[in-house]
Image (cartoon, helix red, strand yellow):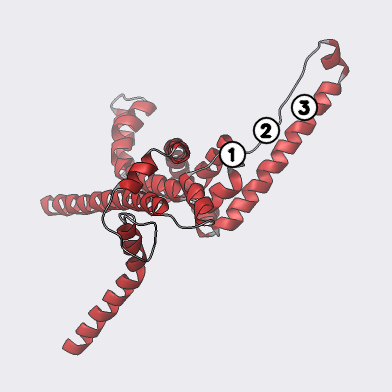
């Protein structure tokens, strides 16, 4: 038994080494005073200074944060509303909707990215053709009107794509809290004179808040870390941090890219720590409530 325990621990250590050794090397060489990725030249913070003075990186960071925050906010509201709608359905239509909801999470990112790119191209061309037809009509020519409904892929299409793949994660995070919710709470609030909105805001929403926050954090993590879907839907005028890293790595891996990758890794790691801490506190709170009961 003792030998099996030692072997299992050794195997676990090798697995963690295989997973995190490349990231550790990247972090170490982000502080390398040399441009080489193989020879250590001393400790320096110059690459982080150059990174923060790089206007292209700052613009990509601004776009990434703006898209992630907006997409997370929209997806959280839409996903929570969808989860409430799913919970009120009968079993068969609810199961069908949940199956459809699981497709974006299990589908390959490249398929989602290419399909959304084709959708945006088709929609842009259809709107352009429609505006062209309106401009040729007699009433538009007589009134000297000009319609231009076409659009190119850019920030808007990128935001729509992020909202689309964020919503399923919010739904999955909120649904368990809805199953745990006592339906009599809202009815009791209505019997005591509260309106439906007041009952939802003061009774239902606080009970759902842990699931909503978890869904928000997961959606933000998925959005800020996405590359494949962003690459196909951002167009040529907008670039996120992951797209900037990909474009630079195609030339060569510079210490500046190591510094940027390190900062992104730390940001995602902090978000995951926050999620795990919230889950641990919720579990402790449930245990205390069970003991009191």
Q: Circle 3 is placed at which residue position?
A: 131
- Few, some or many residues within 10 Å of mark 3 (<14, 14–19, 20+): some
Q: Circle 1 is placed at which residue position?
A: 157
* Residue located at (26% from left, 75% from top): 13
Which of 217/269 is in front? 269
Location of residue 128 by image quarter: top right
Using the rendered image of the protein, determine whether residue 89 is visible from the camera's viewpoint. Answer: no
In the displayed structure image, the side of residue 28 where residue 236 appears, left or right = right
- Few, some or many residues within 10 Å of mark 2 (<14, 14–19, 20+): some
- Under circle 2, the secondary element is loop
Q: Position of residue 26 (x, y in %)?
A: 35, 60
- Few, some or many residues within 10 Å of mark 1 (<14, 14–19, 20+): many
Location of residue 139 by image quarter: top right
Q: Position of residue 90 (x, y in %)?
A: 49, 49
- Under circle 3, the secondary element is helix
- Under circle 1, the secondary element is helix
Whether label 2 touches label 1, CB < 8 Å: yes
Which of 61/209 is in front? 61
Mark 2 or mark 3, whichever is nearer to me: 2
Point out the tag, 2 or 3, that comes first from the N-terminus: 3
* Residue located at (53% from left, 42% from top): 239
Point out the tag, 3 or 1, that comes first from the N-terminus: 3
Quarter containing the N terminus: bottom left
Point out the tag, 2 or 1, that comes first from the N-terminus: 2
Above or below, 74 relative to 279: above
In the displayed structure image, the side of residue 266 where residue 75 appears, left or right = right
* Residue located at (27% from left, 48% from top): 274
Q: Position of residue 170 (x, y in %)?
A: 42, 46
Q: Circle 2 is placed at which residue position?
A: 151
């Amino acid at each position: 038994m003792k030998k099996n325990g030692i072997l299992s621990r050794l195997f676990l250590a090798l697995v963690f080494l295989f997973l995190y050794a490349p990231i550790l090397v990247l972090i170490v060489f982000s502080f390398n005073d040399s441009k080489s990725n193989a020879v250590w030249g001393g400790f320096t913070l110059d690459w982080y200074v150059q990174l923060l003075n790089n206007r292209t990186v700052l613009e990509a960071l601004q776009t990434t944060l703006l898209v992630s925050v907006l997409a997370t906010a929209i997806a959280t509201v839409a996903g929570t509303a969808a989860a409430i709608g799913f919970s009120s359905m009968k079993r068969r239509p609810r199961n069908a909707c949940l199956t459809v909801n699981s497709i974006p999470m299990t589908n390959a990112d490249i398929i989602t990215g290419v399909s959304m790119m084709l959708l945006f191209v088709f929609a842009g061309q259809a709107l352009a053709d429609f505006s062209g037809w309106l401009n040729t009509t007699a009433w538009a020519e007589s009134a000297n009107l000009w319609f231009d409904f076409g659009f190119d892929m850019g920030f808007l299409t990128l935001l729509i794509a992020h909202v689309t793949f964020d919503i399923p994660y919010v739904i999955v995070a909120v649904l368990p809290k809805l199953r745990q919710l006592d339906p009599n709470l809202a009815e009791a609030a209505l019997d005591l004179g509260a309106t439906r909105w007041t009952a939802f805001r003061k009774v239902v929403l606080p009970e759902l808040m842990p699931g909503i926050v978890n869904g928000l954090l997961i959606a933000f993590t998925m959005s800020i870390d996405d590359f494949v879907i962003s690459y196909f839907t951002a167009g040529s005028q907008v670039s996120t941090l992951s797209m900037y890293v990909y474009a630079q790595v195609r030339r060569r891996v510079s210490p500046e890219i190591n510094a940027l990758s390190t900062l992104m890794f730390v940001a995602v790691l902090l978000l995951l720590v926050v999620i795990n801490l919230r889950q641990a506190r919720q579990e402790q709170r449930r245990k205390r409530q069970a003991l009191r009961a």
